[in-house]
Amino acid sequence: MDSSSNVVLSTQEYNVVGTRPIRHDGTDKVTGRAVYGGDFQTAGLLHGKVLRSPHAHARIKSIDISKALAHPGVRAVVTAKDLPYAPDKLADLGEGAANLKYLSNNVLAYDKVLYKGHAVAGVAAVSPHVAEEALSLIEVEYEVLPAVTNAPDGMKDDAPLLHDDLFTTFLGEKAEVPSNVANHIQYVVGDVEKGFQEADVIVEREYNMATVHQGYIEPTNATALWNADGKLTIWCSTQGAFVVRSVASEILRIPVSDIKVVPMEIGGGFGGKITIYVEPVAALLSRKTGRPVKLIMSRAEVFEGTGPTCGSYVRLKMGATKDGRITAAQAYMAYEAGAYPGAPIPQGTMCVFAPYNLENGRIDGYDVVVNKPKTSAYRAPGSPNAAFATETVIDEICEKIGMDPVEFRLRNASKEGTRRMDGPTYPRIGLVEVLEATKGHPHYSAPLGGPYRGRGIGTGFWGGIGLQSSCNISVNPDGTVTLVEGSTDIGGTRAAVAMQAAEVLGIAAEDVHPSVADTDSIGYTAVTGGSRTAFATGYAAYEAAQEVTQKMRERAATIWEASLDDVEYAEGVISHKSDPELRFTFKELAARLPGTGGLITATATVNPRGVGGAFATGIVDVEVDPDTGKVTILRYTVVQDAGKAVHPSYVEGQMQGGAVQGIGWALNEEYFFNDNAEMVNSSFLDYRMPTTLDLPMMDTVIVEVANPGHPYGVRGTGEVPIVPPLPAISNAIYRAIGVRLLSTPMSPGKVLEALWEKDEREKS
Amino acid sequence: MPTVFIPTMLQPLTGGVKQTDIEARNVRQIIDGLEELYPGIKVRLVEDGQIRPNVSVAIDGEIARMGLLEKVGEGSEVHFVPAIGGGSPDRSKPLK
C-alpha cells in the first residue's frame, strides 16, 4: 500500500530519528527466510492437537482417554488433571492482568467448559493427522448448561452463573452473592444533574458492539521441550517471551529459571498473543513423552479458542449548550469479559471521555463474564467500544446545534493540565494539534461528489504504558554495533529501537544490527503491547547507547593520555576539546578497542515514566448503496499525534493498519452465534475482514507534539488509530442516508433495515 | 504535602470528602494516614500487606510500580484507580 503522508509540527529534527532506513529484518521477511513458530523443527518432534468443547456451557462429568492412549500413533494425552494447583492470584500480562486460576482453567478446562472451543484435552502423536484422529477417541461426558452471550443478559438476576464463586467487587468491597459481574467501576465528578439542567441539548443513545478477533495471519503456535534435567524450552509466537515464561512458571509450578522462552518471528498479534494457550499443553505433553511437541492451532481454533476483544453494551448521555460546551456526560458501560473476568473496562472507562474537559460526569463500568472465549487485548482494548458511543453522540449534538464537529471538539478538547475523569491530569498532549490538522486537511473540505455519500469524523485516545525494557549494545571492531533486545518485533520495532541507539551513537541505522533474544539472553522486557516498544525499549536503547558513548570517551582519554573531562562525544566523533589533532570517528576508535583494553559493551534496563498518551482522528467518506445496503469506503485519512515518529514509514503503517482494523470492526466483522451460543463463522471465509480490494489508500498525517517524557519525544502509536473509524463511519453513514447505526457491524443487512425503518417513519 | 484524591467508590467512607492532604513520603504512609482519618479505608486498598490486585496507585499520573514502597513527592497527586484485569473468586475454595 502506497503511503500519502505528511508530518506536521515536527518539534525537532535528528540525524537518524525521523528518517526512513530499510528495516533490518526486511530481507528475511520478503525472502521467506524469517523463522516463524510453524517453521520450527527439531529432532524427535511430536505433533499435538487439542480437543475442544462443542458446548458453550457445560459441566464435565467424566473424561475417558483410554481409547486415545491405545492408538498406536499416540504418545501421550493430557487433561486438566495433569496441571498442578493454580493459585488464585493476578499475573501481570503487560497490557492486562489475569487470575492464574482462570488462566489455568482456560488452558485446560477443569470442571466446566465455559465456551464452545474451550480446551479439554491435548494429544501428542507421531503426526498431526494421527493426533487429530485420536481426539475423536477421547470420550467426554458433559452436562449441558444454559449459556449467556452478552453482557446485559449476563447481568440479569436469573442469568446462568458461569462461576459460583465469583462476586462483584467495587474497589475492594465484595458483594455477598455470586454474580456474572466481576467488577463495577465508578467515577463521578461535579454535579451531573446540574450539568444536564444547564444543557440546551441532551442526547442519549444505546450502543451494542460485536465481539471481534484480532485476525492475526499467523495462527497461535508453540513447541515445547521438557528436558530430562527439568529444564523447559518453549519456542512460540508471542508478544512477550517473559510473559510466557512467568505465566508458564505459575501454571506449571516450576521456577522461571527452569524455563527458557524463545520468541519466534511473529505474524501479527495486535494484543491477542500476550496471554498463553497451547504452551502449557505442549509442555505437559513433552514432559510425558520426553520429546519435543509442537502445537499449531487451526484458524477455527484461533477464533474459538483464543481471546477476541469484547462485545459491549454502552448507554451514553451528553448535554451541551448551544455554543458547543459540554455541560455533563454520563456513561453506563457493560463489557463482556468472556469466560473469565478481565474485560478491558478499566481502559474503557479511562478512555470514554478522555478527549474532553468535563466538569460534570459519571461513569459506571461493569466487567461481565459470558459464555464466549476469554477476551484478550486488541489494539487500544476497550477504547473503540467507548468512542463509538461518545463520538456519535457528539455528532448528533453537533447536528442539533448546527456546529462543525471539529470545532465542537476543539471547544471541549483536553489539553495539558486537564483532569481526566479517572483522576490524573494530562501532561503535554497533542489533541488540539490533531484537531487543527484535521480541520485544515484538504480531505475535510473536499466535495463529496455524489448522492448517498457522507463524511464523518471520530476522535480517539489511548494512554499507553511504559514498563520494563532491557537492551544490550556491543561495539564491534568494524565500527558497527550489535543490539540485543527482548521486545518481539511487531511493526518494525527492531528498526525503531536500533535507530534510537544510532542517533545517540552518531552512526548510521544500518550500522546497528538488532536482534530479539530469548529470555536467557536479555534482561527482563515486558510485552510488545500497550504502544510501549518504540517508547520504552527505545528508551533502553537510548540509555545503553549513552553508556557506550561514555565508555568510548574513557577509552579515547586513555589512548590520548588525557583527562576524561577534555574528551567529548558528538555525532559519532570523539574529540579532544582543545587539541584538534586528537580525533576519532566511531569506526576509527572501534578498530582500536581490541588492542586498548577490549571491546565495549553496555546494558540498560529501564522502567520509564512519562508515557504521554496519544490522540487520533479519522476522516472518512462513505458511499451507501441504497439497494443493497453496502457501505463503501471512498476515502480515509488518519491524523495522529506520534510525539516523534522514529521511522515515519512504520508509524504510517501502524496508522493505516489500525484504521483498517477499525473499519473491519465497523462494517463487517463479528462473532456470529447460533441459538446454542456456538460461534458459527469461525473461518476467514465467513468472518469477513477487509482486504486491499475493499479499501482505498489510507492517507496519514503524523502530528508531532513531543512527549516530554521521552528523550526524542516519542509517543506510542500502535493502538489509537483503531479507535476513530467506528464512530467516524457511523457518522458518515448518517450524513449519507440519514440513519444512525448504533451497533456493529454496520453490515448491509443492518443498513437496509435502518433504511426501511426510516422509510416507514417518513410514510407514517 | 501530597494530595490524595479519594475515588468515588471510597467516598462513602470519607463522608463525601473527595481529596485530602496527607503528610507522607510513600504510598504506605499515605494509606496509613487515610486509615487514621477514615477507618475502614485501608482494607479496601490493601490485602496481605500489598496493594490489592484490583487496585492501582497512580502518582502524578503514572501507575506506581513499587506498590506501597512507591515514593510520593511534596506536591504529588495520588490516585487510586481500578487495575486492569480482576475478578474476585472466593479464596476459601481452592481449585483442587
Image: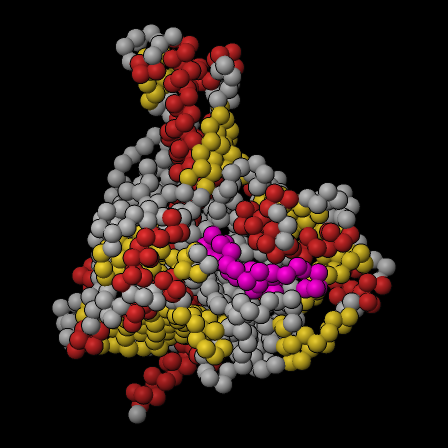
Q: How is the image coloured?
A: secondary structure
Closer-to-camera residue (A215/A110): A110
* Number of residue marks: 0
**Quick check: can you spot residue A367?**
yes
**Residue A658 left/right relative to A617:** right
Q: What percent of the width, then of the height, locates residue B83?
A: 41, 60
Tell me where residue A77 sits by quadrant.
bottom right
Q: Is residue B21 magenta?
A: no
Q: What percent of the width, then of the height, locates residue A115?
A: 59, 72
Work out which quarter of the rendered image holds the C terminus of chain A and state it.
Answer: bottom left
**Residue A204 left/right relative to B82:** left
Q: Going 42% across and 47% down the picture, which residue do you hit?
A: A467
Q: Going 28% across and 75% down the picture, which residue do you hit?
A: A317
Q: Which residues are magenta?
A: A79-107
Q: Is residue A99 magenta?
A: yes
Q: Going 77% across and 70% down the picture, which residue do you hit?
A: A64
Closer-to-camera residue (A680/A336): A336
Q: Going 60% across and 51% down the picture, which residue do you hit?
A: A249
Q: What percent of the width, then of the height, locates residue A296?
A: 66, 55
Tell me where residue A134 sits by quadrant.
bottom right
Closer-to-camera residue (A437/A480): A480
Q: What percent of the width, then of the height, locates residue A423?
A: 28, 59
Classify A372 as above or below A89: below
**Quick check: can you spot residue A631?**
no
Tell me where residue A386 sits by quadrant.
bottom left
Question: Residue pushed farthest left?
Answer: A323
Classify A509 as above or below A689: above
**Residue A219 left/right relative to B12:** right
Classify A49 as above or below A3: below
